[in-house]
Image (spheres, helix red, strand yellow):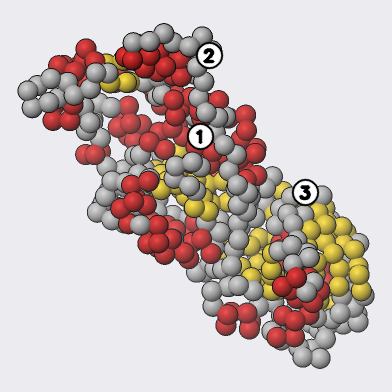
Amino acid sequence: MFGLGPEWILTAEGAPIADAMVFSHPEQIARLAESCPEAVPTAVLAGDPCFDRILAARHHRDRYRRALGVHPGQRLVLLNSTWNPTSLFGDSGPEDVLPFLLPRLTSELPADEYRVAAVLHPNIWHGHGPGQIRLWLDKARRAGLALVDPLEGWRQALIAADVVLGDFGSVSYYAAACGTPVLLGATDPEALGAASPVAEFVRDAPRLDPYGALPPQLDKLLAEHRPLDGPATLTSSVPGQSAALLRGLFYRMIGIPEPAAPAVLDPLPLPPYEPPLRTAPLRVLTRTTADGTIAVQRFAEPRYEPDGAEGEGHLAVHEDTLDPGVLESADVILRYGEADDPRFGSPHDWAAEVLDRYRSASLAAYVTGPRECEVLHRGGLRCRLASDTAGDPAAHASALLARLHTGPAVVAPAPTTLTVRTGTRLARVRVTVVREGTGRAARPGS
């Protein structure tokens, strides 16, 4: 049994190495008694401080979601992997799922309906090096994947998640203990003690079909999810008490009186604000409903037309996309930044410059915040878009393009408001015209 066999915890003479071994649940001490009875006298039940910090911070869930740039109506999918070779990030299992899965996570899941983040075990970072990890995940990051700090940020991301896509590691088990739906993309029964709670969880948890469409699997997981009893009860038998139990143990071992003040754990810090920056080309589909609402779906560099997608399509590309050649065929060119960034002169200066350089583009949108962007159309229309809810205003720019282009070479008058639907989220967008257009689309270069 990993970590609890005599070879791990006894000296060559057969004595326990440690004066005290801390466990979070009596079930673990019972397994210690089976694997190494000589060490049972050192066993102490003192809870799980990691789990207690998660429990104490759950009321900050909305803050953690906003820190990751998750908007109302979006689902946060948290990808996680332990460090075993047969883990999700490993390459010695029966199937190497991750290289096939990563691009599909960011291309099949609509960008405005899902946020995808990844937590990789610290040993993965240490074993391969941060540069190699970022190189392997560079394409996924450009498509919107967030890489979460493996030491200081993973608990907050776990609290924020709607779905965890993982393996047999502790993050998946903590997620299940919190009641979060878990979909397993890699399992290795041989890496776990058959009678352990984690092994039982792995046997019972839903499995990812790596070849099936992802959105239906996530919908089904959420619709049918029922929290498992095992993780919630077996992670800790004394939830919320680890600080007091551990401090009491430490002071008894030191042999001095324990302080009178309450024993507490450091609260989880609020992570920095890291909204998604998608520089991969976006396939945008727009559809106007009978009531005038414009439904927008955006997919990051899809390999094929998304299942069930319908509507008029166009290509939206961030100016800093990896392949500048894609800009030559973009319909919308994007940039995110401060409105007064002196490097670009002004949002209008930037927009005029890129429309002059990329003659096939109809619209340039400079996003200045989670609710606002400034837009310039090739036909001369210049306006500001401001939404009543936070989101990605680049989607609203695409909706405006759909409203303006009512036919070949025809530009409709600018509306005063737009109603934009992305998934279940409805945004009302105020359109403030700074300069009217010509009323018809100018030819590229005119």
Between disc 1 and disc 2, the foreground one is 2
Name the spot of residue 165 as percent of width and height, x first. Answer: 45, 45
The reply to whether dot 3 and dot 1 touch (C-beta < 8 Å) is: no
Figure quadrant of the C terminus = bottom right
Q: Distance between the residues labelled 1 and 2?
A: 31 Å
Neighbours of disc 1 within 10 Å: few (<14), some (14-19), many (20+)? many
Looking at the picture, how far across and down is residue 145, in whole percent? 52, 56
Q: Which residue is drawn at 36% across and 31% down?
A: 201
* Pointer 2 local density, CA inside 10 Å: few below 14, some 14–19, many at least 20: few
Residue receiving disc 3: 389
6 shown above or below 43:
below
Q: What residue type is labelled 3?
A: Thr
Residue under circle 2?
262
Question: Callout 1, which amino acid?
Answer: Thr
Task: Answer with left or right where residue 319 lies relative to residue 353.
Answer: left
- Residue pictured at 75% horizontal, 70% vertical: 342
**Going 55% across and 56% down the picture, which residue do you hit?**
109
